[in-house]
Image: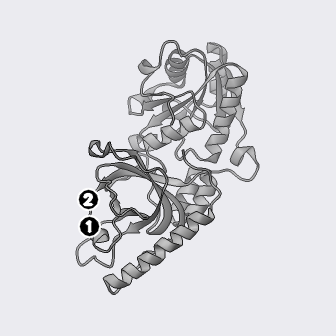
Amino acid sequence: MTTAPIWRSVQEVPSDLGATAVSIGNYDGVHRGHRYVLSQLVGHAEARSLKPVALTFWPHPRHVMGIPGEPPLLTGQADRDRLLLLAGMHGVLDLEFTREFAMHSPEDFVRIFMVEGLGVRTVVLGEDALFGRANAGTIDTMRELGRRYDFEVITVADLGPEGTDGGRISSSAIREALLQGEVREAAGMLGRFHTVTEVVHRGHQRGRELGFPTANLGPEPAGLVPADGVYAGHLTVVEQHPDHADVPPLTGAPATISIGTNPTFTIAGRPRRTVEAYVHDDHDLELYGDTVRLEFVDFQRPTLKFDSAEALVEQMHLDVEVTRRTLGAGTVGAPPTG
């Protein structure tokens, strides 16, 4: 379990934090490219007896500033911060990004949030990092401010995963893979399986009637929902409803996940896209009101419309068997999300 702190303002940062090494970014997805920069931050911090801290923002600046072409985010805020802590951060300063916040000049941003707020002594940044009002701050700006406020600036080459020269990893490339249902390819770039998180809601109970009770996610999962289809994956309960406190929470339970509009049962109107997961071998499972994290391991098949409920049930049995084989074979060599 991660226990390092997440601060939502500089006022929450403890006065006895001590000197820090800091990196700045949105870190959407906390993919392998991000983690290479963070690993360099941790290494430089340890060499200098500093505490590594990630300085990040929520919501995404594009959303707040109304910039056209705002992309869907790979991760929700809680999962993004959790992944930053798992990357070795002593703490995460996660600041609310507002239009007022965006007006800080590069120097005010550094002085208020990094020098006075975090006691920064070392800054580790990618070569193309920008900061401050209208992204006016560059690496050269940061170096000048470092001389003024007595901290060093270290740049990390824009390399591929774990510092290789295998090509730059970007959130946009991962996003495109997920929107095509290519969750295995996305996992290779993320260095982990992609996840979405949401509270379990009551659905139409069709799965239970068919012998496959499912956990139906609410309408706004945190994290990018992949393309419609059936997937092999896992389900983890991250926060239980108080009524379920006496039941051990599931962790990494094998699950067959379905995304789509349930075309077999859609009669009229505009169908709602749903995300639901069948947890294997536990038909009495009660998850309503729990917050769960779904982990996508592999794509199995596209969404289909069946002529009868019986034909659908037959296919669901096949889907579960494919999931069992996939998870048993470990077809994606990505590390667990923690």
**Amino acid of disc 1:** Gln
- What distance separates the C-alpha of mark 1 from that of mark 2? 7 Å
- The disc at residue 23 is none
Q: Which of 24 and 295 is in front in this view?
A: 295
Q: Residue furthest front?
A: 246
Q: Residue 65: where, in percent of width, then height? A: 41, 41
Would you say 110 lies left or right of 45 here? left
Which residue does the image show at 34% across and 84% down from the upper left? 310
Q: What residue type is labelled 2?
A: Arg
Residue at the (66%, 30%) spot, across then down: 42
Q: Residue furthest right?
A: 165
Secondary structure of the residue carrying numbered label 2? loop
Picture layout, residue 188 above or below residue 39:
below
Residue at mark 2:
202
Can residue 331 be seen here?
no
Residue wearing tag 1: 205
**Residue at image point 38% right, 33% down:** 99
Neighbor class of circle 1 (other Cα within 10 Å; few <14, some 14-19, many 20+) is few
Say left or right for 102 vs 242: right
Residue 250, position in %: x, y? 43, 51
Kindly indicate whether the residue at mark 2 contacts the one at mark 1 (C-beta within 8 angstroms).
yes
Coordinates of residue 287 in the picture (x, y in percent): 32, 53
Tag 1, which secondary structure?
loop
Asked whether 77 or 238 is in front, the reply is 238
Label 2 Cα crowd, 10 Å radius (few <14 / some 14-19 / many 20+): few
Left or right of residue 124, residue 55 in this image: left
